[in-house]
Image: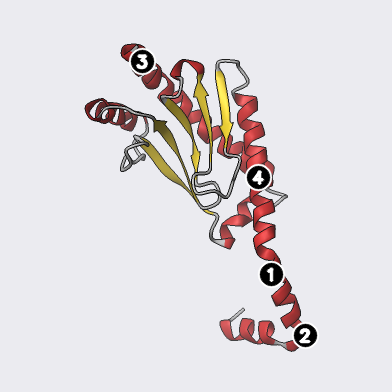
Amino acid sequence: MSSDAYFDFITDKKQWDVVIDIHNHLPSVKQKLLNVFWGKVTENVESIFSDRKWVVEKSDDLFGKISGLAVRHEEWSDVFKVGFGQLDGHVWIGVYCNDIPGESYNILADQLRIKMPKSRRDSTGWPSWYHLGEDFTDVSSLKRILPNCQELAAADYAKKLQEIVVKSEPILTQYVKKSA
C-alpha cells in the first residue's frame, strides 16, 4: 500500500477511532508482550541451568533503567554474571564483572574476545557483550515475540545465553580460582 493510501485509510473518519484506540493501547500491549516473553525466557533459562551450582537472577522491574536476566555460577560469587541487559529496548547479551582491576580486566576481556569474536568491550562492567538485533523500542521488533512466536523466540534467547556461558565459564572460573 502506498503512503497516500495509508494516509487516506488512517484519516478516514470511520477508521480514526480505531487508530486512536490502537495508539492508546499499544504501550500496555507492548508491556504485556515483553513481560510474558521474558517470563518464558526465564523459564527456559531456569530449565537449562537447573543444577544447584547456578543462580538465575531477573530484575524485578523489567522496564527499569538497569533491567536484566542473568545466570551466575556459585563459584563466581558476585564477581561475574552472564546475561541479558536492556530487556525492554535494544537487547544485549554478555559477561558482567564486578570490581576487576584494570590490567586484569583487559586480559579477561581479551580472553573472552577470542571465544566470542563479535563481542564488544567498551564498558568497564561488561568485558564482553553484543546486541542481539532486537530493539523493542521499535514496534516492528515486537513481531518476533507475538504470542504465536514466543515459545520459539524464548528458547532461542535461552540457547544464546547458554552458548555464551559455555564459552565463558572456563575463563571466568579460572579467573576466580586464581584470584582466591
Q: Is residue 10 above or below residue 150?
A: below
Q: Would residue 179 be found to the left or right of residue 144 on screen?
A: left
Disc count in the image?
4
**Label 4 crowd (10 A; few <14 / some 14-19 / many >=20):** many
Earlier in the chain: of badge 4 and badge 1, it is: 1
Secondary structure state at the residue bearing disc 3: helix
Using the numbered discs, state the Cα–Cα distance from disc 4 to disc 1 in whole angstroms: 21 Å
Earlier in the chain: of badge 2 and badge 3, it is: 2
Q: Foreground mark, 3 or 1?
A: 1
Do residues under tags 2 and 3 come within 8 Å of each other at their CB atoms? no
Do residues under tags 3 and 1 come within 8 Å of each other at their CB atoms? no
Residue indicated by mark 4? 37
Residue indicated by mark 1? 24
Using the numbered discs, state the Cα–Cα distance from disc 2 to disc 3 in whole angstroms: 66 Å
**Label 2 crowd (10 A; few <14 / some 14-19 / many >=20):** few
Using the numbered discs, state the Cα–Cα distance from disc 2 to disc 4 in whole angstroms: 34 Å
Res 14 label: 2
Earlier in the chain: of badge 1 and badge 2, it is: 2
Residue indicated by mark 3? 174
Q: What's the amino acid at mark 4?
A: Phe
**Whole-percent x and y of residue 163?**
49, 29
Using the numbered discs, state the Cα–Cα distance from disc 3 to disc 4 in whole angstroms: 34 Å
| Quarter of the image with the N terminus in it | bottom right
Q: Is residue 99 above or below residue 174?
A: below
**Label 1 crowd (10 A; few <14 / some 14-19 / many >=20):** few
Q: Is residue 134 above or below residue 26?
A: above
Q: Would residue 59 be found to the left or right of residue 110 on screen?
A: right
**Whole-percent x and y of residue 105?**
28, 29
